[in-house]
Structures are given as C-alpha cells and as structure tokens.
Amino acid sequence: MVANEKTLEHLNALEDVLVKEFRLCQNLYTLTKDERAALATNDVSSLLTLVERKEALLDELGQLDDSRRTLTQETSQQLGLNIESPTLTDILPALDRDSATRLGHLREGILALMNEVKDLTHGNRALAVTALERTDAVQAFLLSLYQTPAGYRPQNVPASREPTLSWEVDHTA
C-alpha cells in the first residue's frame, strides 16, 4: 500500500505522465486516420503536413515514455519492490485499489489506442505501396509509348550493325 508522501508525489507524477501519453495517443490515432484519408485521395500536400506532425508527436511520446520509465523505477523503489526494470504492471499490485484502478485504466486505454494506431498504420502502408506500384506502372506505360517496339526497323537499315558471324574456317596459319 502507498505509505509516504514521496510515493504519493511519484504516483501523481506518473498519473500525469500517463494522462499526457493517453492524449498524445488519441492525437496520433486522429492523425493516422487523417493520413488514411489523404492516402485515399492522393493528397500529397496533406500527407507531408501530417507526416511532420506525426514525427513531432512521436518525439513527444518518446520523451513521455522515458519519463514514465523513470517514474515507474522511482515509484518501485519507494514501494520497496526489488525489480531491476519495473513496468507499470509490476507496481500496480503494490498500490492501493483506487490508484491501481486509475493507472490500470490509463494503461489499458493507451494500449488499446496504440493497437488501433498499429492496425491503421498497416492499412496506410498497404495504401501507400499500392499507390507507388500504380505510379510505377503508369510511368512504365508512358515510357513504353516513346520507345520503339521490339523488332521494328526503319526501311533501308540493316537488321544488325554488328559484324555478321561466319561459320567459315580460315585455314591459313
């Protein structure tokens, strides 16, 4: 159970970090859905903006992840748990019911959102690959329009400009 004031400070800070992480995950989910719409409509300018925003958001998520790990480590030490690299799941049983419930719900919400983002991202990747394949096919088709067909030869031009091979054997030596 939570015993001292220092532990309560760590738990409050941990909860604040988890709330921020949850909100960033919601924003990431929204951006990923917007990315899907931009891919579907081939809106390249929107894609560029969305990618920049997602990169900034992912950087911020990385910083929050570091903060969460640090706070989880400190809280684990305050609770007297002897775990080398504790996770949120490791410290929940040592907390009072209300704190454990709040932190557990935040953790579950973050995991659910990140699974949704993962699924959307896989779909977005498939859309992007399909668009690139379509672009390559169109490019190949357009290039084929400007190339001479195989076997085509203008009039009065020999079939090959290479010397013809002869099966004759020269016996002079």
Image: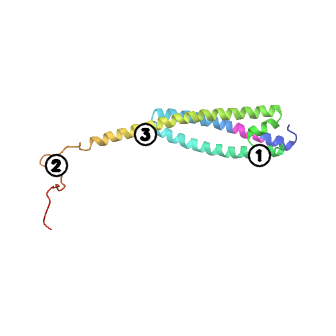
Q: Secondary structure at mark 2?
A: loop
Task: List the residue tagged with mark 3.
Answer: 132
Name the disc covering residue 150, or none: none
Measure the C-alpha gap from mark 1 to mark 3: 45 Å
In front of the other: 49 or 15: 15
* Residue 161 position within the rendered picture, expressed as x and y whole percent measured from the top left: 18, 54
Q: Find the magenta span and give its range.
A: 13-20
Between discs 2 and 1, the one toward the N terminus: 1
Per the picture, the main secondary structure of the magenta-coloured stretch is helix
* Residue 102 position within the rendered picture, expressed as x and y whole percent measured from the top left: 76, 32
Q: Secondary structure at mark 1?
A: helix
156 horizontally vs 129: left or right? left
* Residue 16 position within the rendered picture, expressed as x and y whole percent measured from the top left: 74, 39
Task: List the residue tagged with mark 1.
Answer: 73
* Residue 76 position within the rendered picture, expressed as x and y whole percent measured from the top left: 80, 44
Dot in front, 2 or 1: 2
Task: List the residue tagged with mark 2.
Answer: 159
The quarter holding residue 147 reads: top left
Q: How did the renderer colour the structure?
A: rainbow
Q: Residue furthest right?
A: 3
Between discs 2 and 3, the one toward the N terminus: 3
The quarter holding residue 52 reads: top right
